[in-house]
Amino acid sequence: GGGQVTMVTKSGSNEIHGSVFEFLRNSAMDAKSFFLNRSGGKKASFQQHQYGASVGGPVIKDKTFFFGLYERRLVKSGSFSQFTVPTPEQMAGDFSNTRNPNGAVRLIYDPFTTRDNPDAAGRSIRTAFAGNRIPASLFDPVAQKAMQLYPKANQAGAAFTNQNNVAIQKVPRSPTDKFDFKIDHNFSQSKRFFVRYNRFKQATAAPDWWDNGAAPSDGIMYWGSHNGAVDYTQTFGANTILNLRGGVSRFNAWRPAFSYGFDVTTLGLPAALQAVALSYGAPRIPRFDIQDFT
């Protein structure tokens, strides 16, 4: 059904007052859960460090006051993911041991031999590569450079298919910063004014899994807000109050890919493609889809 929230920013006074706080969490001081102990697993890394300070006081005694606040929150939490990358044999064009989940070899066919099927109108046939190996003469130079972006397998992966043959753990950082500032001024006992500004910004972490921007993952989300308000209050006797208030708020968010600014011509792709990427304002490592020639 919706709701309404009213917040009041603290004001300064005729005396200077301040506060400091800190909150800390670290997985080194956490106990293992029952199930983690039972399986002999390792605790995931987690650190949270949150601290801040505030201060308020007079600018002109009995007339003008200030109040300011700064707060920072830093979280580092372990993330784990698995990927499937080509084996060294596949990168060399050798698919003689590329199998389906049942263990059968997956035959690959030469797309340059595509021709009409004389036994089925409207359908095509192709010739399989000899020995299920792609000749080096058919290697595309762009593909050869793109393959260098893959990490090396660090585990066996699934039986027959080698799926999930790369396992990576990262500890990304997620910092958050908050700043508040307020000025109060009393023109008289019946006329009061304040102006307030708030700034909030955060970087939502996302690991660059392969450390080169080529992994299928999003970049870090940078987002934040600016908020300001002015208020004038005047009392007229015991029964009438005039309150005038105005505010403005601006929110922005940006999530560039880890490969933002990548020049596709370094892979051997045409400059025209880089020009198109620049026209969209987000050049990055291109996505390569696998064409199934089985």
Image: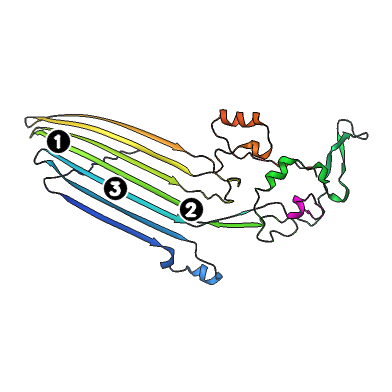
The circle drawn on residue 172 is: 2
Ranked by sequence position, the earlier of labels 3 and 1 is: 3
As helix, strand or loop, the secondary structure at mark 3 comes to: strand
Most frequent secondary structure within the magenta stretch: loop
Comparing 94 with 158, the one in front is 94
Q: Are marks 3 and 1 in contact (CB under 8 Å)?
A: no
- For marks 3 and 2, give the CA distance: 23 Å
Q: Is residue 55 above or below residue 255?
A: below
* Amino acid under disc 2: Pro
Of callouts 3 and 2, the N-terminal one: 3
Q: Is residue 224 left or right of residue 215?
A: left
Residue 293 colored magenta? Answer: no
Q: Which residue is mark 3?
A: 70
What residue is rendered at 43% in x and 50% in y? 174
Q: Which mark is residue 185?
A: 1
Q: Which tag, 2 or 1, sits closer to the chain's start?
A: 2
* Magenta span of residues: 85-99
CA–CA distance between discs 3 and 1? 22 Å
Amino acid, disc 1 = His
- Which of the 4 image quarters holds residue 252? top left
| Residue 243 image label | none
Q: Is residue 1 visible?
A: no
The answer to whether residue 78 is seen in the rendering is yes
Q: Residues within 10 Å of mark 1 (few under 14, many from 20)?
A: some
